[in-house]
Image: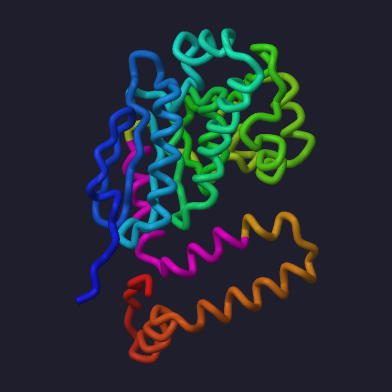
Amino acid sequence: MTTIDAPLAGYTAKHLRLEVEGTVATLTLDRPEKKNPLTFDSYAEAAAIFRAAARDEQVRAFVVTGAGGNFCSGGDVHEIIGPLLGRDTKGLMAFTAMTGELVKAMRACPQPIVAAVDGVAAGAGAILAMASDLRLGTARARVAFLFNRVGLAGCDMGACAILPRIVGQGRASELLYTGRALDAEEGLAWGFFNRLAAPEALAGEAAALARGIAEGPAFAHAMTKRMLAMEWAMSVEQAIEAEAVAQALCMTTQDFRRAYEAFAAKRQPEFRGD
C-alpha cells in the first residue's frame, strides 16, 4: 500500500492558524487586534510551513488570508522594528535573510497560492500578497509597499524583482518610491488583483478558487509554477526549449492518460497528481 506523505495535516501551528481541509490548506494571520502583524516567530513558522508543503502529497493548493477584516499590517512595530534598532549588521542581515526565506519558500512550494486580501496589506503584508500566485481582494483592500515611510528601500523581500512583473516597471516604481496605498479598483485595473469580491464572500471565493485548482493535475500545476519562475531569466528561445522538456515530462503522468481516456469516454477527468 502506498503511503501519502502529508506533513501539513499533522502540523500544529503556534504563531499562525493552519487548517487543512481535503486538498486545500488555509494559512491565516491571526492577530486581528493589531491587524495581523508578523513577528520573528510567525515569519519563521510561515516559511517552515511552505517548505513542508514541498513534501506534502495531499495539499494541492493554499489560501493565505488574515483574520478580522484585514490581511496583514506588516512587521510588528514593537516586536520587530524596535528590537532591530539594537542589532549590529550581522544581526540585521540574519533578519533580512529570514524574511526573504519566506518569499523563497512561497515561490518554491509546488502548490499554487491564493491570497485573499481584505483591508490592510502593508509592508511585509503587501509582500505576502505579491508573492502569492493569485490575489483576490475586496473593495476595502489597501496595498502599500511603505518601506520608504520608515526610511528603508523598496527593495525588500523580492519586491523589485516580482512587483514589476505583476503591474509593470513604471507602476511598481511609483508604489515603491512613494509608499502610497494601491486601492482595490486600481489594483484590479493594474493586474495586481485577479478579481474583487464582497468582504463577506471573499473567504468562500478564495476557497472555491483553491479547490478548483486542487482538482486539476497537481504535477502539471507544479510544473507551471516552476516554469513561470524560471522563465523570468530566459530568452524566448530558451523558454521554448525548457517548456518542451517540461511538457514532455507532464505527458508521462497518469493524469495525462486519464484525461485522454475521460475525453474519449465523454466524461470529466479525475486528476490524482500521479
Relative to 161, does residue 30 appear above or below in the rendering? above
Q: Residue drawn at (45%, 33%), measured in percent from left and top?
A: 117
Relative to 216, does residue 228 appear above or below in the rendering? above
Please identify the residue farthest to the bottom as the structure is shown: 264
Quarter of the image where one finds residue 124: top right
Q: Quadrant of the N terminus?
A: bottom left
Query: Can residue 180 be spotted in the picture?
Result: no
Instruction: Where is residue 181? Give x, y as percent.
Output: 61, 22
Relative to 62, does residue 152 appear above or below in the rendering? above
Is residue 217 inside the magenta stretch? yes
- Quick one: 98 or 208, which is closer to the camera? 98
Report the magenta residues as a range: 201-227
Instruction: Where is residue 259? Give x, y as percent.
Output: 40, 82
Query: Can residue 23 be spotted in the picture?
Result: yes
Q: Residue drawn at (51%, 38%), measured in percent from left and top?
A: 102
- Quick one: 154 or 42, which is closer to the camera? 42
Is residue 49 inside the magenta stretch? no
- Quick one: 10 or 237, which is closer to the camera? 10
Relative to 204, does residue 15 appear above or below in the rendering? above
Left or right side of 216 for 155: right
Instruction: Where is residue 31? Give x, y as percent.
Output: 34, 20
- Quick one: 127 or 99, which is closer to the camera? 99
Left or right side of 88 for 261: left
Left or right side of 251 for 2: left
**Helix, strand or loop: magenta stretch:** helix
Q: Residue drawn at (32%, 48%), measured in percent from left and top?
A: 25
Q: Quadrant of the C terminus?
A: bottom left
Please identify the residue farthest to the left as the structure is shown: 1
Instruction: Where is residue 80? Give x, y as percent.
Output: 49, 15
Quarter of the image where one finds residue 247: bottom right
